[in-house]
Image (tube, rainbow, N blue to C red):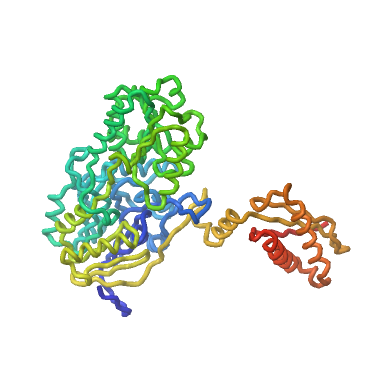
């Protein structure tokens, strides 16, 4: 790939706002002249260095500034990392949205949660072809994934075909009965594809991924091996095929099913209403009624497979959910693999469950999870069918993208025809060349409660400081006429336990009084200067006594 500083006006741009160099918040935009289409609009969960943050979404600045050019928003499937930021995008951009039935049903649910309505949601099916503006024609191609209604995209532009695999695997025995449409993918490859952007999640895993039907067989054996025990199965709420298998097995083994977790209840309700989840309503039991059902007649299907702190399974493991008390007659199945970075939280939950005497079954010891992302041989297969001129690995951290590029080169692709991208990259194409254009604004916007983007690095730094070192507050009362101190109060939170450190607190007050006594009248008149000097002196004193650096606040009250 040529990376030239000279500006070249090429007709087609692919821009990355998320999902490249990272797992989550997938979002890309294609632009030809004055027309833009958006592919996916996802979110991710905050990392451990983002205390208090609820969600992380892409930075929409470029799209908002060019909102009049946007012709449509295309969604590959209904996972949160591909649709979760839609309510925030649609507050600023009015454009038609296209996706399959289940995908749009989940989007509509998110919009209702945010009290948003009146948006144009257009349902498509695999093999549907839509035209957007004068520049783009989009074909939806059925692929297997861990949620129904997943599609790859073949986008025809005036420059050539751009092929997005979306999230996919090649499953020849899928739950829905329809394998990934390799025939159509091969036909598109025969036409000639300018550029392919491919899922890289499992590029490090050799061979092919396990079929979802294998999980069903493993779960059936667990039902048989635990005939006299209560079963609690944690999985992703969006894994509708997994939930369908659990419901079918519960019916087969004459067990009632209770759902637990807000997202589990919401997705199950939405999926059943549109026919993606099929079951006898009489099999369900409300979580409030499970005390009347014997252990051997019950299955609880819950969220929390990633050890999320507020999830239902985590609360059960901590005795914080009084409707389900874990004990020696429980078998807990964690039917999911850890998302990178979540391993410690999951292990904590597993350890807590063992402490309560429960039996725990998870992926390391049983085939209770099948990934929705293809392994290396599946990625190779699709790459060989599409035969793109240019290749951009996406949906992965830097190591995944690099490995995927190496695999493509091992299959004969030229290194000059492969690009490992980053957020904000704008790749410009004509029918023969691929070049790096000018960067666009991209990055992470933090959502905290009702605030979107109002929490930045300074706030995060303060929160981290508070969480690690605590807070130390000194309040001075000053008589403005005599300039004498009338009160000096000190309080602490998360730093020391004040009842056991009275000597430290008294000495801290002495430090404040000494600072005040040695300042002249001019300094005393500048309260900002006074507060800064107090903070500096207290910081030195407290560190010398405790080797800790709490956040120090000094306040002055007039009397």
Q: Residue at x 32, y 59 (%)?
A: 28
Tell me where residue 321 appears, x and y as whole percent: 50, 33
Tell me where residue 210 appears, x and y as whole percent: 23, 44
Residue 227 visible? The answer is yes
Left or right for 212, reference 521: left
Q: Residue furthest right?
A: 482
Tell me where residue 420 appears, x and y as whole percent: 29, 66
Count of all numbered marks drawn on residues in the image: 0
Left or right for 265, reference 146: right
Q: Residue at x 52, y 48 (%)?
A: 449
Residue 158 visible? The answer is no
Tell me where residue 284 appears, x and y as whole percent: 36, 25
Q: Nearer the viewer, residue 457 or 547?
A: 547
Question: Which image quadrant: the N terminus?
Answer: bottom left
- Residue 510 is drawn in which quadrant? bottom right
Q: Nearer the viewer, residue 21 or 306?
A: 306
Q: Residue at x 50, y 37 (%)?
A: 318
Note whether 13 is above or below 332 in the view shown.
below
Left or right for 349, reference 239: right
Note whether 202 is above or below 278 in the view shown.
below
Question: Which image quadrant: the C terminus?
Answer: bottom right
- Residue 258 is drawn in which quadrant? top left
């Amino acid at each position: 790939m040529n990376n030239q500083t000279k500006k070249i006006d090429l007709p087609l741009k692919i821009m990355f706002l998320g999902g490249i160099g990272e797992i989550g918040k997938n979002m890309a935009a294609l632009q030809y002249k004055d027309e833009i289409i958006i592919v996916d609009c996802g979110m991710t969960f905050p990392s451990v260095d983002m205390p208090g943050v609820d969600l992380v979404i892409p930075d929409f600045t470029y799209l908002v500034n060019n909102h009049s050019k946007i012709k449509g928003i295309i969604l590959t499937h209904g996972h949160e990392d591909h649709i979760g930021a839609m309510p925030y995008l649609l507050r600023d951009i009015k454009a038609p949205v296209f996706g399959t039935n289940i995908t749009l049903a989940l989007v509509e649910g998110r919009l209702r949660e945010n009290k948003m309505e009146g948006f144009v949601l257009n349902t498509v099916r695999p093999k549907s072809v839509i035209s957007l503006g004068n520049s783009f024609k989009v074909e939806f191609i059925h692929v297997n994934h861990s949620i129904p209604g997943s599609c790859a995209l073949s986008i025809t532009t005036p420059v050539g075909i751009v092929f997005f695999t979306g999230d996919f695997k090649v499953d020849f025995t899928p739950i829905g009965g329809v394998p990934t449409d390799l025939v159509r993918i091969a036909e598109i490859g025969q036409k000639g594809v300018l550029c392919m952007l491919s899922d890289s999640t499992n590029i490090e895993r050799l061979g092919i991924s396990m079929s979802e039907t294998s999980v069903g067989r493993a779960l059936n054996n667990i039902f048989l091996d635990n005939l006299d025990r209560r079963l609690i199965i944690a999985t992703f709420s969006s894994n509708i095929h997994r939930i369908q298998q659990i419901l079918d097995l519960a019916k087969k083994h004459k067990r009632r099913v209770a759902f637990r977790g807000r997202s589990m209840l919401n997705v199950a309700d939405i999926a059943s209403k549109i026919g993606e989840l099929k079951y006898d309503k009489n099999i369900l039991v409300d979580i409030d009624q499970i005390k009347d059902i014997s252990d051997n007649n019950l299955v609880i299907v819950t969220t929390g497979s990633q050890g999320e702190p507020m999830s239902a399974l985590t609360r059960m493991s901590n005795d914080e959910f009084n409707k389900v008390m874990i004990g020696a007659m429980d078998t807990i199945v964690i039917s999911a693999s850890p998302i990178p970075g979540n391993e410690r939280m999951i292990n904590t939950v597993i350890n807590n469950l063992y402490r309560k005497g429960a039996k725990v079954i998870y992926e390391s010891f049983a085939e209770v999870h099948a990934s929705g992302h293809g392994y290396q041989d599946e990625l190779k297969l699709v790459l060989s069918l599409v035969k793109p001129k240019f290749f951009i690995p996406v949906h992965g951290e830097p190591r995944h993208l690099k490995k995927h590029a190496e695999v493509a080169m091992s299959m004969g692709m030229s290194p000059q025809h492969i690009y490992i991208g980053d957020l904000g990259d704008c790749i410009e194409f004509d029918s023969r060349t691929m070049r790096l254009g000018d960067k666009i604004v991209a990055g992470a916007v933090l959502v905290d409660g009702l605030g979107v983007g109002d929490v930045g690095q300074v706030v995060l730094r303060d929160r981290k400081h508070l969480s690690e070192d605590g807070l130390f507050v000194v309040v001075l009362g000053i008589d403005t006429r005599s300039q004498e101190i009338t009160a000096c109060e000190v309080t602490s939170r998360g730093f020391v336990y004040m009842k056991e450190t009275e000597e430290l607190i008294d000495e801290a007050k002495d430090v404040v009084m000494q600072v005040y006594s040695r300042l002249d009248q001019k300094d005393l008149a500048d309260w900002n200067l006074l507060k800064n000097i107090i903070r500096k002196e207290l910081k030195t004193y407290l560190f010398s006594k405790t080797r800790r650096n709490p956040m120090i606040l000094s306040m002055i009250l007039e009397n």
